[in-house]
Image (tube, grey):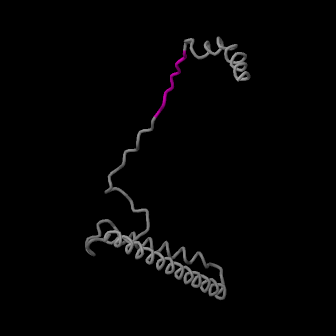
């Protein structure tokens, strides 16, 4: 108890005027003004003027009604894919191409097996969850 009293007397109360000056005396405050600029969102154009940039299967509603030029886009996408495939094997001999093809096929099979195993695991968990939920409903 004596040490606590000494600490309070020699520490806090000795410097009480300093603490009260720091925490209680009103001092003038400086206000800083800052200007922030917010970008305006870009005005989007009409969708009728949009260009198709992606790849995918876009089919016209009717074969005769190709006003969007989907046939042309599909042909361009197919030609780009063909160029990509040709560029991948450019300068390789037939033996190297065959080795690459076998390895790619093997990896595709391994990936397919892994996906099938995952699907079976998920199906099992789903069935267990449904069984548990039906048991809880019955109770």
Task: Estimate the x, y position of residue 122 in percent, counting from the top left.
Answer: 46, 75
Task: List x then y, in percent, for residue 9.
Answer: 70, 16
> In which quadrant will I find the C terminus?
bottom left
Question: Which quadrant of the figure contains the N terminus?
Answer: top right
**Left or right of 109, for residue 41:** left
Q: At 32% from the left edge and 65% from the top edge, which residue is drawn?
A: 68
Residue 137: x and y in percent read 32, 69
Name the residue at 64% across, 86% down: 99
Q: Residue furthest front?
A: 1
Question: Does 125 sit left or right of 28 as displayed?
Answer: left
Q: Is residue 12 above or below residue 82?
A: above
Q: Residue at x 66, y 88 (%)?
A: 95
Q: Camera-side residue: 134 or 48?
A: 134
Between 21 and 55, the one lying in front of the other is 21
Looking at the image, residue 117 sits to the left or right of residue 20; the answer is left
Magenta stretch containing residue 31, yes or no? yes
Magenta segment's dominant SS is loop
Magenta part of the chain: 29-37
Judged left or right of residue 100, residue 32 is left
- x%, y% of residue 108? 55, 81
């Amino acid at each position: 108890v004596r040490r606590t009293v000494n600490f309070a007397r020699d520490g806090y109360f000795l410097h009480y005027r300093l603490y009260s000056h720091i925490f209680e005396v009103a001092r003038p405050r400086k206000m800083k003004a800052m200007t922030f600029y917010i970008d305006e969102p870009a005005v989007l154009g009409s969708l009728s003027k949009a260009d198709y940039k992606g790849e995918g299967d876009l089919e016209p509603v009717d074969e005769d009604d190709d006003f969007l030029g989907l046939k042309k886009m599909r042909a361009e996408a197919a030609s780009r894919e063909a160029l990509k495939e040709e560029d991948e094997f450019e300068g390789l001999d037939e033996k190297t191409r065959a080795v690459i093809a076998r390895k790619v096929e093997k990896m595709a099979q391994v990936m397919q097996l892994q996906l099938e195993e995952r699907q079976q695991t998920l199906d099992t968990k789903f069935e267990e969850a449904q069984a548990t939920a039906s048991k809880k409903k019955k109770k």
